[in-house]
Amino acid sequence: MAAAQRRPVVVGGNRTPFARAGGAYARSSNRDLLTAALDGLVARFGLAGERLGEVAAGAVLKHSRDFNLTRESVLGSALANDTPAYDVQMACATGMETVMSLSDKIRLGRVDVAVAGGVDSASDAPIVVSEPMRAALLELNRAKTTSAKLKALAKIRPSHLSPVAPDVAEPRTGLSMGEHQALTTAQWGISREDQDALALASHQRLAAAYEDGFFDDLITPYRGLVRDANLRPDTSMEKLGALKPVFGKRLDTPATMTAGNSTPLTDGAATVLLADQAWAAARGLPALAEVVDAEAGAVDFVHGKDGLLMAPAFAVPRLLARHGMKLGDFEIVEIHEAFASTVLATLKAWEDEDFGRDRLGLDGAFGSVDRDRLNVHGSSLAAGHPFAATGGRIVATAAKELARRGSGARGLVSVCAAGGQGVVAILEAV
Amino acid sequence: MSGPGVSPGGAGEPSAPVELAEVPPLGASLRRGVRSSATAAVRRDRSLTPFDLPDVRLAARGLTTDPVCLTDYQHLVGATASDDLPAGFVHVLAFPLTTALMVRDDFPLPLLGMVHLANTVTQHRPVRLGEALDVEVHAERLSAHHRGVSVDLVAEVAVAGEPVWRGVSTYLAKGYSLAGESAERADRPEWLAPTPTGVWRLPADLGRRYAAVSGDHNPIHTQVLAAKAFGFPRTIAHGMYTAARALAEIGAPSAFTWTAEFFAPLTLPGTASVAIAKDGDGGTLDAWGKRHHLHVEVTPA
């Protein structure tokens, strides 16, 4: 059966360097950034003028004018205009969801080649008018007579004029993501030192990867930026330790989460070229790693049962059970650093006997991850985290690293998301 | 004024360029242009000779691009916001130097009221954000036109000695004449509007918005009263806005020639039908309403 032999592989990736909000991409829109990342990918793999199977991407902070963001980006890119595209939105797991669904389509034989990705601009975020203002403006738009128009306008009060800026608060709890994570940090007793140490390792490893030229074929400079602007190669435990806590200050445990061990608001885009292995081979293109399988997860954070960003702690054990694998089977493990304590709480949960038994239904603890295999080239704390772009960044980085390690090398990727969700995936070097 | 035996500007040996330490700000040039245009308006003698163009080349070296201006320009004309400068943005970068040439005392035609007839740009390769540009401008081909006298303003752009871009803007000064030459109205074959592929809806403030990203604050584009003074019912869109938007919509390879013919101005606010006809990596765009406004053509090199 021909379909059974199809293998979705990561051919490569391309992203923009990530900028801090208000920095190099302050005027750039989501469409600009996504198009730039796409065009870099097209140039790298010689796809100009080609019709690809599908392009899927998305943004978390999205203007209503960007209703067809990915399709519009394709139309502005060097790809053929008859390449279909669609938008996906699964908060910070958007990029992972596009990798998962497009890999499935490749495995099914529905498409041979596709681009997954995501973009976010915290700088160019949509500003929304207040609800009463919006209601009045809609009424004005419907009004046909002058008196009806005046009546609609008369409903606007000065207090309605202040715009509503986007925030990252959960609609159902009112807590920001940082405040949610502070609850998890306290629940799992994650220390300030451990968080700062993880942040330090992230910066040091990302800096080392840049020095080694690891990102030379994963990043295309944009708007004068050649590296992630958030990267601080010279940071230290002293410098990180000097930062004041910003989240968890209302709890009765000490606040430990700072701007140094939390991701900053960031602008950027990332893309991943996925293809059937045979398609890549016929083109003479590399096959870095197969997307073996993936799993989405979600937790009930609304009632405080689990932390907002803990869905991967459940999704990974389910995914690995399906394949009869354990954590020790992976040469590299990529856990998105939304906050240092997100990674640490996830690891701690997996090492916890009670959590393994009571929550995961195992005989005991799920397992532990060797720190030398964790986020080997740094992650979001150093690179930054343009929400929907993070999945693409991590998948491309992990696939390249697995290919370097040789055929059969396995990688685990885990990305948590707002709404108590997450998507995790298994990659394996071809 | 050129002396006897000196060829018309551009036709003979090029003169040594006048290097400008800095590009004159457009605002100052425009104010100067307003004054000299007013002087020219009261001058009765509007007959020129083919030798009246100043034999001068202005040059500026090492011009760089502000990424914010580039992004704003790309957004307005609908170009992909890549690090490759749109060919029309290079025109914008050279424009202050061209204007500085046109407001010199020895330039024979008034800046204000000139009509942009046509524009041709040849791009040898894309200019990248961050590259330092050397720009040189001169005027040539003072020619008789059935409504006056036309002149070509030529801008040449190089990066580290490599020519990358050349633009020729043809302007008409109405009511002028050229001694010993006359031109009949060229017969244009009747133009039949094709099936439209789209529509341009141009907002009332488009002139001000393009002025903001291009620096071209010519009042016929930004102020209704000024536009009326020059015979337009309302403000009109910048020709180079329409040409740049057409270039973005047609699409282009990395090396190409891009020509625009401006037949009738688009008044603001306004709506025009457009038709794009792709031809390989290039193609054409026509825009029309009651009249045929413009024809733009992109020809791959």
Image (cartoon, coloured by chain):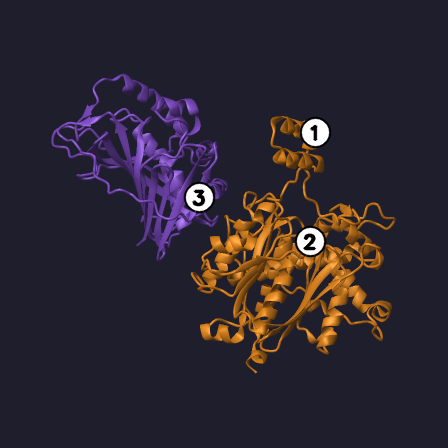
Chain colours: A orange, B purple
Q: Who is closer to the viewer here, B173 or A143?
A: A143
Q: Which residue is mark 3?
A: B199
Label 3 Cα neighbours within 10 Å, binned few <14 / some 14-19 / many ≥20: some
Residue B53 appears at what percent x and percent y? 22, 30
Label 2 Cα neighbours within 10 Å, binned few <14 / some 14-19 / many ≥20: some
Q: Quadrant of residue B8?
A: top left
Q: How far apart in space, not on screen, are marks 1 and 2 (Cα)?
A: 55 Å
Earlier in the chain: of badge 1 and badge 2, it is 1
Q: Are marks 2 and 3 on the same chain?
A: no
Does A288 appear above or below A209? below
Q: Residue at x 55, y 81 (%)?
A: A2
Give the quarter of the figure containing the C terminus of chain A.
Answer: bottom right
Element at badge 3? strand
Label 1 Cα neighbours within 10 Å, binned few <14 / some 14-19 / many ≥20: some
Q: How far apart in space, not on screen, are marks 3 and 1 (Cα)?
A: 36 Å
- Residue A385 in view in this figure: no
Query: Can you tell which of label 2 and label 3 is closer to the viewer?
Result: 3
The numbered disc on residue B89 is none
Does A159 appear above or below A222? above
Badge 1 sits on which subunit? A
Q: Which residue is mark 1?
A: A155
Residue A88 appears at what percent x and percent y? 62, 57
Residue B210 appears at what percent x and percent y? 44, 35
Q: Are marks 3 and 1 on the same chain?
A: no
Residue B158 appears at what percent x and percent y? 33, 46
- Residue A292 in view in this figure: yes
Element at badge 1? loop
Q: How many marks?
A: 3
Element at badge 2? loop
Q: Residue at x 29, y 26 (%)?
A: B104
Q: Amino acid at mark 3?
A: Val
